Amino acid sequence: MRVVLIGAPGSGKGTQGVVLAEWLSVPYLSTGDLLRDQAADGTPLGRRVAPYLDQGELVPDDLIFDVVRDRLKALEARGGYVLDGFPRTVSQAEEADESMPGGLADVVVYLSLPDDVARERLRHREEGRTDDADEETIEHRLRVFHSETEPVVDYYRSRGILRSVDGDRPPEEVTAAVLAAIN
Ligand code: AMP
């Protein structure tokens, strides 16, 4: 099964994605983790993307496609995937849907979360992420989510493969709801 997880920063995509991938026995891919690793390692790609990550801006689509194109094909050959953080814009979704046979996803799970709960969670996140460090960057990421990524929710809703799950609950309850939603 090929699953895409969409949600505001702080909505629990990473936590849920890992559990879901294990449950489905498919690989989990977080574009945010991947980009952060590249940035931390100082690779050529990492040096190009680091300023976007730090400012809470989206990395340009062509760079993202360089990163995910081959990986998606390889993962699909392993029977599916759980994607966390991709696609982030309607143009990414459209391009990915065209490039993958049968589209990018069988089901898209949207973890909904009120902004103030997202703010509160991001302020207390313990990973020491530089893009969680200050209020202004957190606000910017929420704005980017609403303007760029929420339209992706509507895009998949209109394709009939969207499942919405209330993310404002304890993680185990969200997991149960996610599993129910994909079955
Ligand atoms: P995340 O861990 O999913 O919150 O992603 C962290 C950061 O990585 C984002 O704020 C963006 O700068 C970048 N990023 C991750 N995925 C994408 C994507 N699909 N398109 C553009 N930028 C992305």
Image (spheres, rainbow, N blue to C red):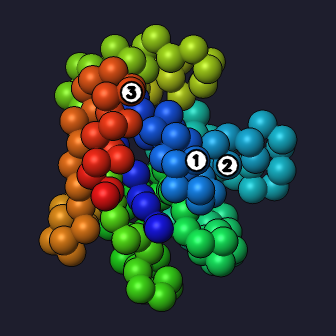
Contact check, label 3 and label 1, Cβ < 8 Å: no
Q: Nearer the viewer, residue 98 or 28?
A: 28
Q: Nearer the viewer, residue 146 or 68?
A: 68
Q: Is residue 151 above or below residue 57?
A: below
Q: Is residue 108 above or below residue 125?
A: below
The answer for how far apart the CA atoms under marks 2 and 3 are is 25 Å
Instruction: Mark 1 vs mark 2: give the one in front.
Output: 1
As drawn, the label of residue 22 is 1
Query: Secondary structure under badge 2?
Result: helix
Query: Secondary structure under badge 3?
Result: helix
Residue position for label 3: 172
Comes first in the chain, label 3 or label 1: 1
Q: How many badges with numbers are in the image?
A: 3
Q: Position of residue 34 (x, y in %)?
A: 67, 49
Q: Amino acid at mark 2?
A: Leu
Comes first in the chain, label 1 or label 2: 1
Is label 3 within 8 A of ligand 1 (CB to nearest ligand atom)?
A: no
| Picture residue at 27% right of the left edge, 23% below the top | 169
Q: Amino acid at mark 3?
A: Glu
Q: Quadrant of residue 41?
A: top right
As drawn, the label of residue 174 is none
Q: Position of residue 46 (x, y in %)?
A: 74, 49
The answer for how far apart the CA atoms under marks 1 and 2 are is 19 Å
As drawn, the label of residue 34 is 2
Query: Secondary structure under badge 1?
Result: helix
The answer for how far apart the CA atoms under marks 3 and 1 are is 15 Å
| Picture residue at 50% right of the left edge, 83% below the top | 100
Instruction: Mark 2 vs mark 3: give the one in front.
Output: 3
